[in-house]
């Protein structure tokens, strides 16, 4: 009576035809999560680098001005920098460029500030306290141009990451011609 059951169990134990399907079913969720997560992570890395390029390029262009720069020229720089984010969404891209004066005590003061696509300009003659101390000490009694950019992005797939990520970059450049750059 138990002989047919024992025979069935022995043949089932020796049969390995379904092992591949079981292994695939076990590993599929892990591999799918890794694949979809990699897509979102790589997209966020690219957007982060592009925001850095926007902040740095606008500040660098302004720092190349000799003695003065027009507001319309800076607005053109802002508009041109938006194309850097392509093919990603640039509707959330906010930019700010600020001229800073560093005094003898390594304190930064706002000379002028302009923004693009939202955000708030820094108040003239106010102290800017977020400057890294090593930057302020290295540029005592000098002028700096600070470029900032902010952007937010949603995940492409949204399987691993499901919330909006914010990116912010800030760069400091010395005036190429050693002096203040007036805003007209």
Image (cartoon, helix red, strand yellow):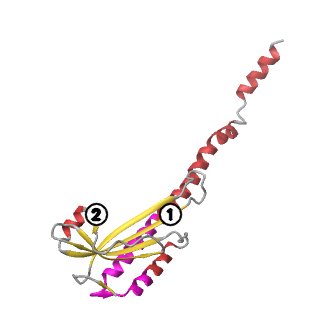
Q: Residue at x 61, y 57 (%)?
A: 157
Most distant residue in the right direction: 1
**Foreground tag (2 vs 1):** 2
Q: Position of residue 176 (x, y in %)?
A: 26, 82
Asked if residue 98 lies left or right of residue 50, the reply is left
Which residue does the numbered mark 2 point to in the structure image?
A: 129
In the image, taking residue 163 as reference, residue 144 lies left or right, namely left
Badge 1, how many Cα within 10 Å: few under 14, some, many 20+? some
Residue 111, image x and y in percent? 28, 77
**Residue 94 part of the magenta-drawn span:** no
**Front residue of 28 and 1:** 28
Is 3 above or below relative to 136?
Answer: above
Q: Position of residue 88 (x, y in %)?
A: 55, 69
Taken as a whole, is the magenta stretch helix, strand or loop?
Answer: helix
How far apart, in angstroms, are the residues tagged by discs 2 and 1?
A: 24 Å
Local SS, label 2: loop
Residue 4 appears at what percent x and percent y?
82, 17
**Furthest residue toward top:** 1
Q: Quadrant of the N terminus?
A: top right
Q: Which mark is residue 152?
A: 1
Which is nearer the eye, 10 or 153? 153
The numbered mark, 2 or 1, whose residue comes first in the sequence reads 2
> What residue do we see at 24% from left, 84% from top?
177
The correct choice, above or below, for 72 with respect to 31 in the image is below
Helix, strand or loop at label 1? It is strand
Q: Which residues are magenta?
A: 48-77
- Displayed quadrant of residue 175: bottom left
| Residue 149 in the image: above or below residue 21 | below
């Amino acid at each position: 009576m138990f002989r047919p059951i024992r025979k069935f169990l022995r043949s089932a134990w020796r049969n390995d035809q379904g092992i591949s399907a079981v292994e695939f079913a076990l590993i599929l969720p892990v591999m799918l999560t890794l694949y979809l997560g990699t897509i979102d992570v790589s997209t966020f890395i690219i957007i982060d680098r592009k925001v850095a390029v926007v902040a740095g390029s606008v500040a660098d262009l302004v720092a190349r001005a000799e003695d003065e720069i027009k507001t319309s020229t800076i607005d053109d720089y802002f508009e041109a920098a938006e194309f850097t984010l392509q093919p990603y969404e640039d509707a959330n891209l906010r930019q700010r460029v600020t001229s800073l004066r560093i005094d003898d005590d390594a304190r930064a003061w706002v000379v002028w500030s302009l923004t693009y696509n939202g955000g708030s300009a820094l108040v003239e003659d106010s102290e800017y306290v977020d400057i890294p101390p090593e930057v302020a000490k290295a540029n005592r009694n000098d002028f700096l141009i600070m470029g900032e950019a902010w952007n937010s992005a949603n995940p492409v797939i949204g399987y691993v990451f499901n919330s909006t990520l914010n990116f912010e970059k800030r760069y400091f450049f010395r005036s190429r011609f050693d002096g203040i750059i007036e805003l007209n």
